[in-house]
Image (spheres, rainbow, N blue to C red):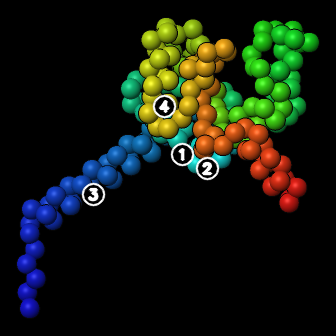
Amino acid sequence: MAVQVDKKVVFMGVGILVGVIGIAIASRWLYKKLDIQTKLKLRQLRPEVRKKVEKFLIKAQKAGIQLKVTSAYRDCEEQNKLYAQGRTAPGAIVTNAKCGQSDHNVGVAVDIVPIVDGRANYKVPESVWNTIGAIGESVGLSWGGRWTSFKDRPHFYDRGGKSIAQLWTEQQNLANLA
């Protein structure tokens, strides 16, 4: 018994497969263009957040915006040092979160900086930050640039529907099991 095959369906299926492979290769190529510091910082994130941040960085590259991850996971010592800045230590206030209160302490956040002419540049126009924010949000990340009391444009995070307190408790429970 001969099986009839619709050639249009076969060609369409092959076309879709080639397109998917092409997108995967292009994404891998763009991922390889990320700097080593960014790649190392991505490894500090929870896997589900890392995937979103990778998509964010690749999508930004496709839009002609190069980004570098400057911060991902922070331990308590680093977080408290940043919290002290502008309070009991020299410098400007850069965070309102002590240890256990930051998205960074639970591996669900990154801070990024745009790279312009090969250099980190936080002073890009507001329109560029808004484009970066929209790209991050389009892949499912929340953006600190939307905060009203302490705008943190470089900050992107995904708590997965949980509070920082819940994530912190989970993390502490896992640490106690180890």
Q: Tag on residue 47?
A: 2
Residue 32 horizontal side relative to residue 122, left or right: left
Amino acid type of disc 4? Glu
Kind of element beneath mark 2: helix
How many residues crowd around disc 2 within 10 Å: few (fewer than 14), some, or many (20 or more)? Answer: few
Q: Sequence-wise, which precedes: disc 4 or disc 2?
A: 2
Q: Sequence-wise, which precedes: disc 4 or disc 1?
A: 1
**Residue 152, image x and y in percent?**
63, 18
Residue under pointer 1: 51
Q: Residue at x 45, y 45 (%)?
A: 28
Residue under pointer 4: 137
Q: Tag on residue 17?
A: 3
Q: Nearer the viewer, residue 126 or 119?
A: 126
* Residue sitting farthest toward the right: 88
Q: Residue at x 69, y 29 (%)?
A: 71
Q: Give the spatial CA distance, label 3 vs label 1.
A: 22 Å
How many residues crowd around disc 4 within 10 Å: few (fewer than 14), some, or many (20 or more)? Answer: some
Q: Sequence-wise, which precedes: disc 4 or disc 3?
A: 3
Q: Residue at x 61, y 49 (%)?
A: 47
